[in-house]
Amino acid sequence: MKVSIQSVNFNATLNLLKFTEKKVESLSKFHDKILKAEVFFKLENSSDKENKTTEIKINIPGNELVVKKQFKSFEEGISTGVESLKRRLKKSKEKLRDSIAI
């Protein structure tokens, strides 16, 4: 799976990039046909503490799954987004299995 990471309005640290890649690549355990993953980090110009937006797009054959989260840290956004995508990938794979079994 190819993982591309983009950061908007700031430069991402090497630790954040490694953390993100490791978390997103773990999704391949839940669906074997993930084509690519795109991660977008955006630092909002606001006084809110939760000004960090994380968006993850996963492309699987015939579908695109998108999760967008806003938290105090990008790591928290990635962790929560990946957990959400795990559930959605499991559901997608179950639907695929059910349609093949019919």
Image (cartoon, helix red, strand yellow):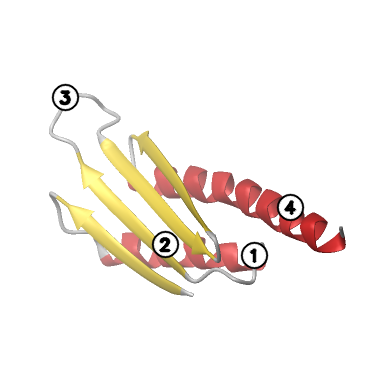
Q: Secondary structure at mark 3?
A: loop
Q: Which residue is mark 1?
A: 31
Q: Which mark is residue 47?
A: 3
> Residue 31's spot in the image, x, y percent?
64, 65
Front disc: 2 or 1:
1
Q: Earlier in the sequence, mark 2 or mark 3?
A: 2
18 or 67: nearer the viewer: 67
> Residue 87's spot in the image, x, y percent?
65, 47
Q: Is residue 87 above or below residue 32?
A: above
Are circles 2 and 1 on residues that touch, CB within 8 Å? no
Q: Residues within 10 Å of mark 3 (few under 14, many from 20)?
A: few
What's the residue type where badge 2 is placed?
Answer: Phe
Q: Which residue is mark 4?
A: 95
19 or 80: nearer the viewer: 80
Q: Earlier in the sequence, mark 4 or mark 2?
A: 2
Front disc: 3 or 4:
4
Q: Which residue is mark 2?
A: 19
24 or 19: nearer the viewer: 24
Q: CA distance from mark 2 to mark 1?
A: 20 Å
Front disc: 1 or 4:
4
Image quarter of the C terminus? bottom right
Are circles 1 and 3 on residues that touch, CB within 8 Å? no
Q: Residues within 10 Å of mark 2 (few under 14, many from 20)?
A: some
Q: CA distance from mark 3 to mark 4?
A: 43 Å
What's the residue type where badge 4 is placed?
Answer: Lys
Q: Describe residue 35's horizontal placement relative to residue 32 as left or right.
A: left
What's the residue type where badge 1 is placed?
Answer: His
